[in-house]
Amino acid sequence: MKYLNLPNTLTISRLVAVPFCLYALFKNGGDDSLWRIIAWGGFFTVGLTDFFDGRIARSRKQITSFGTFLDPVADKVAIGAAMIGLSMQGKLWWWVTILILVREVSVTILRLAVIKDGVIPASKGGKLKAAFQSFGVGFYILPLPTWLHIPRDVFMAVAIYLTITTGLDYFKKVLKK
């Protein structure tokens, strides 16, 4: 029960919300603009909750190993579900989804492998990467006009760059130990 504080409850709620976000993303074949906006709102709320659970944990000194581990897992589940859904709909290239998911799973496995030495917290670069991934994926969820596709793709390109560089950074840190 010591793990059931407000920040961890918010993190768990993010995991519970993902299926509802996916439902909205796929509603009416995934091409209904209203449902895509609802899906975006759901995923945005999930991301916003991520912002608040960390702030609350730090301000109330409720940081737990459980929360430190589960928080990035919840992020990966949300972003991964959205990306897989978008790729299934043909709205996001599969190679982007696979590249990002391979990085995310690899870093999670790395974190599990070294957990006896302590949980590896998210770096500032990792947090920036997560923000770019979230906003980038959000731009693919929204029914944007065609003229916004190039800025959307550039935003995702930055997310891919940050995904690769921060993933390599995690592995370098572990190898230095």
Image (cartoon, rainbow, N blue to C red):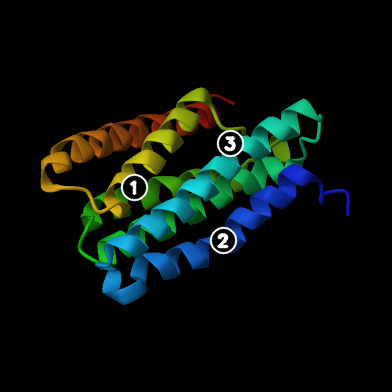
- Name the element at disc 2: helix
Number of marks: 3
Say whether disc 3 or disc 1 marks the residue closer to the N-terminus: 3
- Which structural element holds mark 3? helix
Could you tell which of marks 2 and 1 lies nearer the N-terminus?
A: 2
Which amino acid type is marked by label 1?
Val
Q: Which mark is residue 51?
A: 3
Spatial CA span between label 2 and label 1? 17 Å
Q: Which residue is mark 1?
A: 137
User: How far apart, in angstroms, are the residues tagged by discs 3 and 1?
Assistant: 17 Å
Q: Which residue is mark 2?
A: 17
**Above or below — where is 37 with respect to 58?**
below
Q: Which of the two discs, 3 and 2, labels the residue nearer the N terminus? A: 2
Q: Is residue 173 above or below residue 144?
A: above
In percent of width and height, residue 64 lies at 77, 39
Residue 10: x percent and y percent? 68, 49
Q: Quadrant of residue 151?
A: top left
The disc labelled 2 sits on which kind of residue?
Ala
Amino acid on which the number 3 mark rests in the picture: Phe
Residue 171 in the image: x percent, y percent?
47, 33
Instruction: Tell me the element at label 1.
Output: helix
Q: Is residue 46 left or right of residue 29?
A: right
- Crowd class of label 2 (few under 14; some 14 to 19; many from 20; radius 10 Å): some
